[in-house]
Image: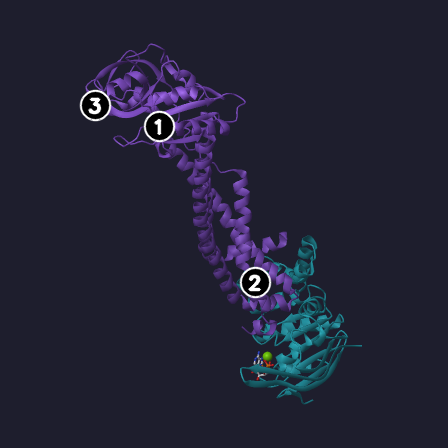
Amino acid sequence: MLQYIELSLKNLAYQRMRALLTLLGVIIGITAVISMVSIGTGMTKAIEEQFEAFGTNKIIISSTMEFGAKGRGLVDADVDDMEDIVGVAFVSPMYSVSTGSEFKGEEKVITVWGLDPGKAERTFSDVGGYRLYRGRWLEPGDRNVVVIGYTVHDDYFRSRVELGNNIKIQGEKFRVVGIFAETGDPDHDKSVMVNLDRIRELLGREDSVTAIIVRVKDGADVNIVRQRIEERLKNRHEDAEFTILTSQQLIEAISSSLKVVQVVFGGIAAVSLVVGGIGIANTMVMNVMERTREIGIMKATGATNSQVMRIFLVESGIFGLVGGTIGIFFGYLISRAINAAAEKYLGPGMLTTAVTPDMVATALVFSVCVGVISGLYPAYRAVKLDPVEALRA
Amino acid sequence: MDVVRLQDVEKVYTMGKVKVPALRGVSLSIEKGEYVSIMGPSGSGKSTLMNMIGALDRPTRGKVFVEGRDISRMSDDALARLRRENIGFIFQQFNLIPRLTALENVELPMWYAGVPKVKRVRRAAELLRLVGLGDRLRHRPAELSGGQMQRVCIARALANNPDIIMADEPTGNLDTKSGEDIISILEDLNRQGRTIIMVTHEEEFARRAERTIYIRDGKIVS
Ligand SMILES: Nc1ncnc2c1ncn2[C@@H]1O[C@H](COP(=O)(O)OP(=O)(O)OP(=O)(O)O)[C@@H](O)[C@H]1O
Ligand SMILES: [Mg+2]
């Protein structure tokens, strides 16, 4: 086998330019495969990590009511109901809204999360990323205070927002008592937490909530608790008024849609590989035609059909291997570049694309296969040549 | 013993609907160690006859025995092995592989025979020295003169130490001096006991063989 490879390399080296052009197809194909798959897995990993950090023991009930729609969205009474359900550890109501804010005369829209101050820490502290950078969490009795996300502190406004500063929300002053460290989710980093009752007061929303986060007791079955919640809510609401999601469901839903993305990416890459394979086949057919006489010489000097076959298959397989190796290298570079770009524009740790040894091995095997398969027809033509005819060429 | 025996061999080439009879009932036998030259006008079937004897092609009718084996009944691969072990070809157009060096060209038949690299290289170098090209091992065909290329060809023909050397107009593309060199190498090989079968247009070279076969219109005339 080594001998065949040695011979093929000599043949390829002899026609560098054509070899290079042929390789281009495979290089582009494998580059596409590697970069696409690495982005795809990077995305899946990023999102899964985020949700894993959120924990699998939570159920999120959100109101699907639009402003001004008929019927009622979720209300405080629902929250009270849920506290009685078997298997529920605790229930945390939430009112989130995008509203006007002002800091040192600069006005900006900000996402405000209204939370029960006594439950805020318990709800979020075990969620990965929600660590305090400075100050403290909301505490019972807090009214005109706010805990801000890292971006809000850092560069959301022209000047930094520090502990003790006042931000105006809905025209009212809120004193900053805490700053979160970066969570890895840019939306969260741009949000602020305030007392649920206070923000509802300011908005005139009395007892409505936009979401309820239920934490399930350790050992309780999340899906059974979910069913109980659903039954309870149906006493008061229409189906259309709320949706219930367990964190598990969220993870599954998102990763399955990411699978689709990956399949599409993979498909595009596969098409470009097929094009690369056709390129190899084309070059190999040309090779066989140009080397007709040489094939005659090979046969006259004693090469068997299977040896002729192997010589051409190894040659096209090497096209695949070399193209694949270069493609993996470029794919790796692209994956690195995307990492750098993601870090710059999305924040650190948001999207970490990776080229794993598995991917490299698969891509190599795959590209060699593409090469060999593309070489089958040309090699067959070489085998079929009649030695006498070939020598006359 | 006869190394080559032909019985009533006919070869018809079919080009579309036209049938071209190249050999029309040729019978002959050549003994081991004989030095035979073949002469005849252009298109008379000399090369076709050489292809039969050299197991490159099968007859349309009749039988061809090489080393006692009937080639019309043998598979492609069996023929390839027969050529590899028992027959060395020398062509008018040299037919060397252009991108390989002289040494590598001579290695090829041994490569097909599965001779390990070290042995292969040693023998190829030895053969090239034998034909006087000891200082041209790394040259490619384009860097060699016609006479030198033909000597590489002879070295290649000898690679697997065959009994039969087939030479189809080996001096056809050479000047008189180089042609003379080639013929004397072939004569040396014959003296070592190898069977030499050579097509030539040169009366003088043909006369130096032990026997000359004249062929015309696909038939042996004497
Ligand atoms: N592959 C082929 N297909 C069709 N006809 C062929 C083929 N090979 C040879 N012929 C024909 O068969 C006849 C004998 O050809 P061959 O090559 O044996 O002649 P030759 O004696 O070697 O001639 P030259 O001295 O020119 O080499 C010629 O008429 C030639 O045209
Ligand atoms: Mg001829």
The residue tagged with tag 3: helix, strand or loop? strand
Quarter of the image with the N terminus of chain B in it = bottom right
What letter labels the chain drawn in purple? A
Report the front residue among A3 and A158: A158
The location of residue A134, given as percent across then percent down, is 36, 14
Foreground: disc 3 or disc 2: 3
Q: Is B177 on the left or on the right of A24, as rendered? A: right
Looking at numbered disc 2 in the image, what kind of residue is underneath it?
Ala
The chain holding disc 1 is A
Instruction: Work out whether mark 3 precedes mark 2 in sequence or the reverse, and give the earlier one.
Output: 3
Q: Colour of chain B?
A: cyan
The image quarter containing residue A159 is top left
Marks 2 and 3: in contact by CB < 8 Å? Answer: no
**Which of A181 and A69 lies nearest the eye of the viewer?**
A69
Location of mark 3 (residue)? A107
Q: Residues within 10 Å of mark 3 (few under 14, many from 20)?
A: few
Instruction: Locate ligand 1 by image quadrant.
Output: bottom right
Q: Which residue is mark 2?
A: A379
Percent position of residue A323, x then y: 49, 50
Q: Residue at x 36, y 10 (%)?
A: A140
Q: Position of residue A153 (x, y in %)?
A: 31, 19
- The answer to whether one can see residue B152 in this image is yes
